[in-house]
Image: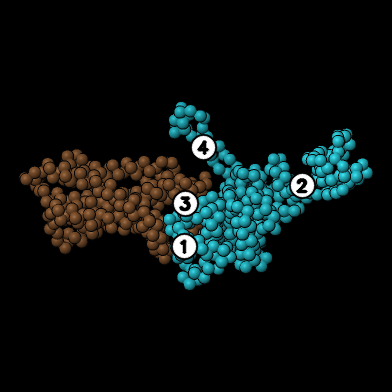
Amino acid sequence: MNHRGGFALIKSTWLSWLQYRSFFFVLAFGWMIPPLVAMFVWLAASGQDGIQGIHRSEFVAYYLVLILVNQITYSQANWTLGDVIREGLLNNWLLRPISPVYQVLSSEFAGKFVYLVFTVPLTILLGLVLRPKIDISFLQLSFFLLSLILAWGLRFVWGYWLALLAFWFTRADALLALQDSLVFIFSGMIAPVSLLPGFLQDIATFLPFRYMVGFPVEIFTNQLTLAEIGLGLLIQSIWLIIALILCSWLWKNGLRRYSAIGG
Amino acid sequence: MNEKIIDVQNLSKTYRVPQRDPGIKAALNQFVSAKFQDVVAVNHVSFEVTAGEIVALIGPNGAGKTTTLKVLTGLLQPTGGSIMVAGHTPGKREHAFLRVISMVLGNKSQMLWDIPALDTFHVLGEIYQIEKIEVKQRIEELSLMLEMEDILKKPVRNLSLGERMKCELVASLLHRPQVLFLDEPTLGLDISIQNRLRSFIIQYNQRYQATIMLTSHYMADIERLCSRVLLIHHGELIYDGALNKLSEQLSNSKLIRVTVSEPLADIDAKEWSSFGAEILEQNHQNFTLRVEKTQAPACTAMLLNRYVVVDLVVENPPLEAVIDRIYQEGAV
């Protein structure tokens, strides 16, 4: 482990990215649009009486928190990993006495910071205008933070193993686009999972995507019982472990293939 | 001082390259039954390098030079043979190994594009866990040697190719590697920067006794830098020794440059052909002949007898021409 080098990488990537902050602001704005559209649709549909017991101010709370959670867990670093493998830049990483994971993590953390500088103030502004209903206990907040960290880990590692497929397939990033679509449908972005039709709800409960975004938001907005939270954390952890195993297997074998055919 | 730092025995590297016929049908077939062809890039190559040596790896494009360098740096796994570099097996890519080597790829940058070179250097200092003060001193020393103090604070993307190559060298030398691999370091650079880099490499080698292995297509690089060349052709090592010996051994011909007192109206071809000589250039009073080595004295005597000679030089063919012939014919 070479944490010293890792921190230096984060700092330098951050410096690089500050050169392009407006580009990243535009990206971050783009990522806010789908949940915002979904929110306004649900606000219009719910009217004064709400839908299935969810009222206007609760929809606002749900989606504003979702925008933040989506931004915190979105892992763009995986998009560039495929290019690095395809274009042979991986050689530069492999020649350094530091694990290549640090390179990806550095752009991940640098990105988080740049995006949040944009997204947090904008969300607060929206909150002041739309007045969400937020009522959260300390215990819920603790569960929320725990599930948020796991959600980020899961979304990052899940994208990482998809990106590692670039060792075998030239355009593995198509799978990342597919993942984004699945997240949109199953993670609670298009609608809170509890509002999905029955069979989709069952699927969403067991697929990993809800645990990347929707699950922490549901905790925060008080939609889950303690038992449901416990089950959710368990499923979230299991998917994270599966993704980690996939990652290490793909990395080991991918690297073997890379060093057999040449970068 | 005379320890072996690179030891390569019977190195072989075979690539499996996917093969398919042109057309959509063949492309779809590829999914069902992929066909591969084995391509031998390096074939039973053995050599040793002593610490502090500067060695050139030469050969035509596709001969296996870069493959050899990549195996020596651990980027590629060999198919066969045993390799030791600075006491490590490169393929394991241990951090202890990566700390004592460095590689500059002439066509792939290791610099961070959008920030000043100085920032990249400091990141590398952290990655190699060098004391901050020490990093500063080394940057100063190297940039002084390369005359590049004024470009350290500019974003790398604003630098010229030559300036960038200087940065690459500093970046790869900050951790004082024992072995430095340079893959075409002077590619695309102008003459004066090439010269600057060459004297830097010599200076650095002398100051720190670093072992340097480089590939290049510029004979000037090799003549100036390397006491020894390894010539690879079709993946096989066909020559290992001094560069001047190579041209002596190789060319069985001599060039005779003659200047005569009066312009020659016409030249009798028969006179030359009896010596097996051929006219390469002819220009008023000057002409250049190529003859076999053994025929050179007799041919020279004939010239002196037959014409009023103002000037006559017998020399070896230029290195480029010699190398070109080996590349074409594939044998020494």
User: Would you name the residue on which mark 3 appears?
Assistant: A90
Q: Are marks 2 and 1 in contact (CB under 8 Å)?
A: no
- Residue type, numbered disc 3: Leu
Spatial separation of the CA atoms under disc 3 and disc 2: 43 Å
Q: Residues within 10 Å of mark 1 (few under 14, many from 20)?
A: few
Q: Residue at x 15, y 56 (%)?
A: A128
Q: Residue at x 42, y 44 (%)?
A: A166
Q: Residue at x 61, y 64 (%)?
A: B204
- Residue type, numbered disc 4: Pro
- Kindly report which numbered mark, 3 or 1, lies closer to the viewer in this rendering: 1
Q: Residue at x 44, y 33 (%)?
A: B31
Relative to B157, say whether A41 is above or below: above
User: Would you name the residue on which mark 2 appears?
Assistant: B317
Tell me the chain of label 4.
Answer: B
* Local SS, label 3: helix
Q: Colour of chain B?
A: cyan
Spatial separation of the CA atoms under disc 3 and disc 1: 26 Å
* Local SS, label 2: loop
User: Would you name the residue on which mark 1 appears?
Assistant: B153
Point out the tag, 1 or 4, that comes first from the N-terminus: 4
